[in-house]
Image (tube, coloured by chain):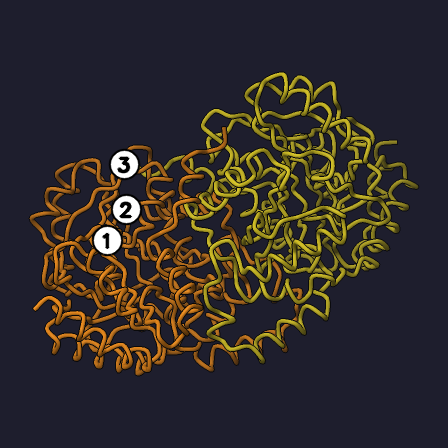
Chain colours: A yellow, B orange
């Protein structure tokens, strides 16, 4: 009688959450330090001090009626101007504050964008492996999800696969770089080739095909350049979140940026505003909006993650693991030494190593390992990883 | 090509927003103090000092990784327990923390609940006058909205009308008491009669009919009792928000409470969790969750609103206006002295009085006046209200 699809979604815990719950039980049994939980992508680095100070200052010095009052539905105009100026100066791209919509974080950015562009039966292409909730968001909006596997090895886009996946029904391709779960960053060549393919198809079909650039990990890169997609492809909508860069995942603050070069960008932005309204997402949390305004130039502390990555990647590859070169985000994507990644994860459990099989991300034969944990946990886990792979030799 | 319905929703500003924008222009022309803007329901009373202090203390004293980290999808377990205990002690009702879902405010509470229960074509009954976004939320979820007008005069439920509105397709009735826009509070007799009617119809049709109790104004009452609906009717879902009671409308914090007495309450709660996930609403803003936990017993400063109400209601009725007895919220619902409330509002504009016609709330012949403004604005506007009604004598 109620909505069965929603009940099913609510009951079915994600694999990640299953492992996280197992970790809690296991830690209670044998002690925290003996369980090596690499399942959850919750930043372990605290929010930058400047962010905390900005929040304190705002609460102490701003009239609470103004600070905690409704902003306009699409977000405070001053906040949006600061973000647009920042995009201009960082990427030399002419962003328009009147085409920015403040959101309650990355998930909201995606659901609002997808609901704005999709009509029932439209197809959305995801590049596997991909964040599993893309499917949930897209299907709820009435879209059909089409998977296009990436190239094994470096996990750049496999254009032969993508050519088959993109059809006259394709409304959007979701691009997530730096990538969860692989840590790969799509190169400039990859983005250029993607733009070329989609432009051709748009012409051929007489349709608009959007790139939805899902960029919560943009700031978490360790040397690589992350091309700013609106500079390469006109019909781009950027979905941004401050969760990872400011280590504020619980606070829910991000934005949608509609490229001024999109076809009928005004209509598209109106649809974003309409979808925000219909889903219940008007006015992102105001204290966080102003915090973003005051901290737009604050950079995350990358050193901790970078050292974690270097230590972990170096050790695992030296033991004989095959690991996707991790240019960004805080994940290692490791080839399972046996074809069935679920079996490998079960074997890892014997060593108290908790890893996530890639199957849920649409990529069998791999496991995801989060390195946004303490250095100590990584270092203490290394003998177990070594012993684990020895079993396969 | 994009979603036309969403574009339309994004382009069509609400009447309230139109008037608000007009006010800005007019104030620039003739000066702030000369324009009497009664259009927007933005609290003018600052957040209670205890709330501000709690936020400061949390930011200063809590580990930021914990404070700003993800809570569980449905909200922090400790926060939900505090809310359940508070409901128990205030209403002597046995709330269950495991049937509470923390949300980004009132709109999110409603969209998540509606999407959890509705299948395409189900009917949702709204009691007119009603908050116009109910229609937007319900239609986006695939429901059909059925209006049932309230009784003129006291704006309690008109049961003859409601008997016609409730059918075998009815999935829910949205009850908003204290009411926006009328300020009426549904009496215990009204709620008892409502419960009786819906129980009969459930039996007759063999269906579940939910009451969605939309309660953002619960704390804003000036003497009246507001019956706690789950005590009177089993299939009740409460949608709560702290926006008005804590004067934090911009911060987006509220909750959904599924009554443990609902049929299959576990399935229903799972559907709420699933809808939250599919709409992108997991983990309400964490700092605000903990603020609610630490301030659950803080009461709003009602004195300011109460005096505003008494001064305003007294004056308008003495001039000859007919006003719905305002028991709660911060609105006066005033009968237009001419049948067309839009024409009346246009005439009021000549006196720089900005009022909202009731038409958009599904109730012609009335205007809504927000009294969550400064006392000064109310007092300075009174001669204009007096002169305005003189025109009709």
| Gap in angstroms between the C-alphas marked 2 and 1 | 8 Å
| Circle 2 Cα neighbour tier, 10 Å, few/some/many (<14 / 14–19 / ≥20) | some
Q: Is residue A49 visible?
A: yes
Q: Is residue B92 visible?
A: no
| Gap in angstroms between the C-alphas marked 3 and 2 | 18 Å
> Cβ–Cβ below 8 Å for labels 3 and 2?
no
Q: Which residue is mark 3?
A: B122
- In front of the other: label 3 or label 2? 3
Question: Is the same chain shared between marks 2 and 1?
Answer: yes
- Horizontal side of B280 relative to A341 (left or right) equals left
Q: Which residue is mark 1?
A: B234
Q: Earlier in the sequence, mark 3 or mark 1?
A: 3
| Circle 1 Cα neighbour tier, 10 Å, few/some/many (<14 / 14–19 / ≥20) | some
> Cβ–Cβ below 8 Å for labels 2 and 1?
yes
Name which residue lies at 55% across and 63% down: B286
Q: Which residue is mark 2?
A: B263
* Picture layout, residue A115 above or below residue B23: above
- In front of the other: label 3 or label 1? 3
Q: Earlier in the sequence, mark 2 or mark 1?
A: 1
The chain containing the residue under callout 3 comes to: B
Q: Earlier in the sequence, mark 3 or mark 2?
A: 3
Question: Is the same chain shared between marks 3 and 1?
Answer: yes
- Horizontal side of B309 relative to A104 (left or right) equals left
Residue lying at the far right of the rendered structure: A318
């Amino acid at each position: 009688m109620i909505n069965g699809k929603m009940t099913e979604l609510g009951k079915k815990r994600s694999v990640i959450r299953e492992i996280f719950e197992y970790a809690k039980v296991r830690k209670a049994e044998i002690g925290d330090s003996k369980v090596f939980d690499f399942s959850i992508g919750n930043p372990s680095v605290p929010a930058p001090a400047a962010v905390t100070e900005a929040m304190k200052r705002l609460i102490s010095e701003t009239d609470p009626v103004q600070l905690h009052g409704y902003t306009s539905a699409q977000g405070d105009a001053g906040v949006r101007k600061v973000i647009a100026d920042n995009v201009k100066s960082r990427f030399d791209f002419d962003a328009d504050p009147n085409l920015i919509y403040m959101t309650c974080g990355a998930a909201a950015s995606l659901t609002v964008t997808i609901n704005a562009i999709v009509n029932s039966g439209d197809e959305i292409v995801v590049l596997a492996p991909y964040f599993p909730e893309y499917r949930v968001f897209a299907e709820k909006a009435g879209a059909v999800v089409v998977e296009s596997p990436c190239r094994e090895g470096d996990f750049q886009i496999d254009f032969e696969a993508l050519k088959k996946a993109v059809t006259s029904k394709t409304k959007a391709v979701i691009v997530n770089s730096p990538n969860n779960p692989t840590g790969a960053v799509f190169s400039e060549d990859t983005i250029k080739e993607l733009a070329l393919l989609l432009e051709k198809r748009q012409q051929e079909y007489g349709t608009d095909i959007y790139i939805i650039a899902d960029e919560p990990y943009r700031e978490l890169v360790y040397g690589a350049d992350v091309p700013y997609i609106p500079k390469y492809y006109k019909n781009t909508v950027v979905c941004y979140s401050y969760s990872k860069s400011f280590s504020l995942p619980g606070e829910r603050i991000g934005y949608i940026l509609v490229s001024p070069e999109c076809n009928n960008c005004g209509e598209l932005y109106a649809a974003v505003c309409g979808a925000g309204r219909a889903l219940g997402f008007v006015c992102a949390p105001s204290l966080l909006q102003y915090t973003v305004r005051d901290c737009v130039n604050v950079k995350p502390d990358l050193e901790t993650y970078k050292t974690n990555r270097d230590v972990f990647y170096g050790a695992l590859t030296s033991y004989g693991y095959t690991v996707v070169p991790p240019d960004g985000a805080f994940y290692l994507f490791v080839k399972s030494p046996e074809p069935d990644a679920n079996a490998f994860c079960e074997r890892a459990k014997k060593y108290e190593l908790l890893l996530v099989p890639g199957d849920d991300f649409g990529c069998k034969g791999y496991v995801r390992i989060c390195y946004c944990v303490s250095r100590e946990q990584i270092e203490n886990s290394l003998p177990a990883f070594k012993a684990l792979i020895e079993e396969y030799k």
